[in-house]
Amino acid sequence: MINIQPGILSAVPAHARYLTFSLIPGGDPVTALLELRRITSGKEAVIGLGASLIEVLDKTIPGLHDFPSYSHAGIDIPATPFALWCWLRGSDRGELVHRTHQIQQALATGFRLNDVTDAFKYQSGLDLTGYEDGTENPEGVKAIQAGIVQGVSEKLDGSSFVAVQKWIHDLNSFESYPLEEQDNMIGRRKLDNEELEDAPKSAHVKRTAQEDFDPEAFVLRRSMPWASSTQEGLVFVAFGKSTDAFEVLLNRMSGAEDGIHDALFRFTRPVTGSYFWCPPVHNNRLDLTALGID
């Protein structure tokens, strides 16, 4: 398929920057989107559009809805909707700064910048806990099957849905646990990334074994660590042909299914949660025809 935003299927970059935008009341989002389309191709900046933006345009994207929020026995998973999301990808952090200003100016007639989060690839693709992230990520044809809309319509095929959460880690707490207990929380050995068959039911790997669901709940993960001067964690990014797989994973993690919380909540917590629809591309530009924008 040639109409997928290329950055979705590409490996995570050395550096990244996540931008979220809200709508300006009385603004002109159509002109802003046309300007954004002019300067982006989906390769160096993956673009996602939120439900509030689609509603303002008086359009419908089947399958796009509000992010679910959960609150179970001390586990809080928030929903924080935004109108537009950009995942900037590159090898130079300064370049991402300049690209941020370019995108912000392009969107100025209709959108206000809400948040900027800088992220990076850690070693071979590890989370800041030292464990490999996305070990069972689908690849090749399976990645497209899990992450990309196909066989729906000409305007929607090649698009994707993405779930985005910003997690804050308490690394001091995590590192206070013995290595064996860390392994049991994750469900893998840190030393060789091998899955622990006898891991507790609360282990993250046990909670999110994508093949254990019916139907299987595979998503295409493109998460990256982030850090500020005082906090750090993971920007969790999961692309899907719909939001269904992500939601069953999140439901089980929260303990809503069987009362068992994912052990991740012992040292990390999500502070944002958003869904976006990532349009397909045509001739190296965002294809917005599903929104009535030619």
Image (tube, grey):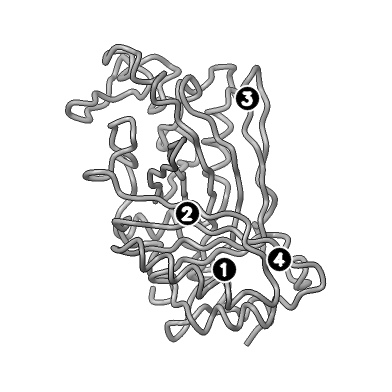
Contact (Cβ within 8 Å) of mark 2 with mark 3: no
Q: Is residue 16 above or below residue 268?
A: below
In this image, 288 relative to 183: left or right? right
Q: What residue is shown with label 1?
A: 152
The CA span between labels 2 and 3 is 23 Å
Please state the horizontal and vertical placement of residue 266, each as a whole percent of the image: 48, 19
Q: Which mark, residue 256?
A: 3
Whether residues under marks 2 and 4 lie with C-beta atoms below 8 angstroms apart, the answer is: no
Give the residue type that dot 1 points to: Val
Query: Residue visible at 74% across and 78% down?
Result: 28
Kind of residue at badge 4: Leu
Disc 4 versus disc 1: distance between alpha carbons? 22 Å
Mark 2 / mark 1, whichever is N-terminal:
1
Alpha-carbon span between mark 2 and mark 4: 19 Å
Q: Position of residue 177 (x, y in %)?
A: 34, 13
* Left or right: 93 as drawn, with respect to 37: left
x%, y% of residue 259?
A: 59, 17
Look at the numbered discs 4 and 1 and tell me whether their residues touch, using CB distance below 8 Å. Answer: no
Instruction: Check the image and report above or below for 46 versus 80.
Output: below
User: Residue beneath label 2, please?
Assistant: 239
Q: Earlier in the sequence, mark 3 or mark 4?
A: 4
Quote the CA–CA distance across marks 3 and 4: 30 Å
Residue under label 4: 53
Give the secondary structure at mark 4: helix
Quadrant, the N terminus: bottom left
Residue nearest the viewer, comparing 111 with 101? 101
